[in-house]
Amino acid sequence: MPRYFFTRFCCLILGVGSVVAASFEKANEQFRAADFTGAASTYEKVLTETGPNAATYYNLGNAYQSLKQYGPAILAYERARLLKPRDPDLRANLALARKDSGIYEDSGRPAWVENVLTYLSRRECSWLLVGAACTLGLLIFLNGLVRLPKTWLLSVSLLSSLFILGTASLLWVRRGESQLGVIVAPEAHIRLSPFEKAESVASPSPGRMVRLGERNRDFYYVEVPGANLNGWVASRDVAPLIPTEAR
């Protein structure tokens, strides 16, 4: 009985995987046929079924970019960059989408510092941190059982400690990414209070990065980095950088 259950379980997993693969290929075919609206819808469906995926986000960004929907395109590219930060094509398309939308993102840090901080994805940093911590713990355990060569022990311990310190520092510096959002509407408004009829103080460009604060009914309190601007934006006009289901 357990063997049959395992076989059926594997068939189910393979069946789901084939359906998702078929949906992804369908989206690619729609894109090649210039059905960008259909392609974007199918890519969104694939993401709903599989969860965050860099390749799907990248293709989704291309579909929205072709539709000149720069807010959703930049959101998709930014989400892909969180997962695959060193992809040159992705970085080039993101820069192009920002240019087309007329926005310029300034983190307030020199470019080389920003490149160092974002060279690894948060997932890669987390795995390195766990790996280094496990290595250090195993080393201490083994040294308690058998005396390891002192030079080798100190070298590996120092290297592991540096990895732990470095990756933990990177994750701490980048902790604010979970509070970022992207303006996705072509005509969003920052208002003085969380009401549709409240006075608008600014209209950020689609694709503009903002920092999300508290939520009041259908509005987010946002701050625009580098612009000394804050207020309330309708939740339909802004999306969290990190999808809610991925947090």
Image: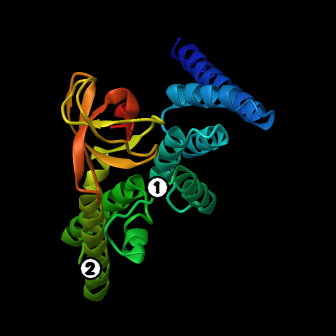
Front in this rendered view, residue 100 or 58: 100
The part of the image, by quadrant, that contains residue 216 is top left
**Picture coordinates of residue 127, whole percent (x, y):** 38, 56
**For the residue labelled by badge 2, is the local secondary structure a helix, a strand or a loop?**
helix
User: Which of the two discs, 1 and 2, labels the residue nearer the N terminus?
Assistant: 1
Residue lying farthest to the bottom in this orientation: 151
Q: Can residue 17 be seen in this view?
A: no
Q: Residue 158 carries which label?
A: 2
In this figure, which residue is indicated by the disc labeled 1? 103
Front in this rendered view, residue 92 or 8: 92
Q: Can residue 212 be seen in this view?
A: yes
The part of the image, by quadrant, that contains residue 217 is top left
Residue lying farthest to the right in this orientation: 33
Amino acid marked by disc 2: Leu
State whether residue 155 is above or below residue 9. Answer: below
Front in this rendered view, residue 225 or 24: 225
The part of the image, by quadrant, that contains residue 133 is bottom left
Calculate the distance from the C-alpha at mark 1 to the C-alpha at mark 2: 44 Å
State whether residue 151 is above or below residue 71. Answer: below
**Picture coordinates of residue 140, whole percent (x, y):** 21, 68
Q: Which of marks 1 and 2 is in front?
A: 1
Front in this rendered view, residue 70 or 125: 70
Amino acid marked by disc 1: Ile
Number of residues whose C-alpha sits closer than 10 Å to that of mark 1, classed few (under 14), some (14–19) or many (20 or more): some
CB atoms of marks 1 and 2 within 8 Å: no
State whether residue 9 is above or below residue 92. Answer: above
